[in-house]
Image (cartoon, rainbow, N blue to C red):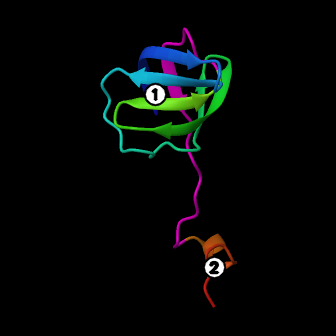
Amino acid sequence: QSIEIFKVSFHEDRQVSVIQSDGKVMVPDELKYRIVRSGNRWGVVKQNDESSITVWGDFSGDRTLTVLPTYTYNKSSDIYELGIGHRH
């Protein structure tokens, strides 16, 4: 998932960047703890609201933010039956 960046505000005291998206509407905290990348910078989402994302690190000057995919087990997967989420 790629997000066009409208504005970045870096807060040195907290070491976070607050990234305003270009109008994409998001569900609050849907990106929390997700890994993101912009150019050669990598970070982790601290939180998000409908129009902004707070990321640990300095993302000043970046224009596009890529949210990396997450990997979860599907309940119909064979691995699910081997213990991940398995109820006895």
- Residue drawn at (51%, 39%) of the image: 47
Residue 66: image x %, image y %?
53, 28
The chief SS type of the magenta part is loop
- Residue drawn at (62%, 81%) of the image: 86
Q: Identify the residue at the far bottom of this view.
A: 88
Whether 42 is drawn above or below 77: the answer is above
Residue 5: image x %, image y %?
43, 18
Could you tell me how many numbered marks the image carries? 2
Q: Quadrant of the C terminus?
A: bottom right
Q: Amino acid at mark 2?
A: Glu
Q: CA distance from mark 2 to mark 1?
A: 33 Å
Residue 55: image x %, image y %?
57, 30
Instruction: Check disc 1: other Cα within 10 Å, few if <14, some if 14-19, many if 20+.
Output: few
What secondary structure is found at the residue carrying circle 1? strand
Q: Is 41 displayed left or right of 22 in the figure?
A: right
The residue wearing badge 2 is 81
| Of marks 2 and 1, the one in the foreground | 1
Whether 76 is drawn above or below 19: the answer is below
Q: Please report whichever mark, 2 or 1, sits nearer to the chain's N-terminal start.
A: 1
Q: Is residue 77 magenta?
A: no
In front: 39, or 19?
Answer: 19
Give the magenta part as a residue range.
Answer: 58-76
Instruction: Check disc 2: other Cα within 10 Å, few if <14, some if 14-19, many if 20+.
Output: few
On the image, which quarter does residue 24 sit in?
top left
The residue wearing badge 1 is 2
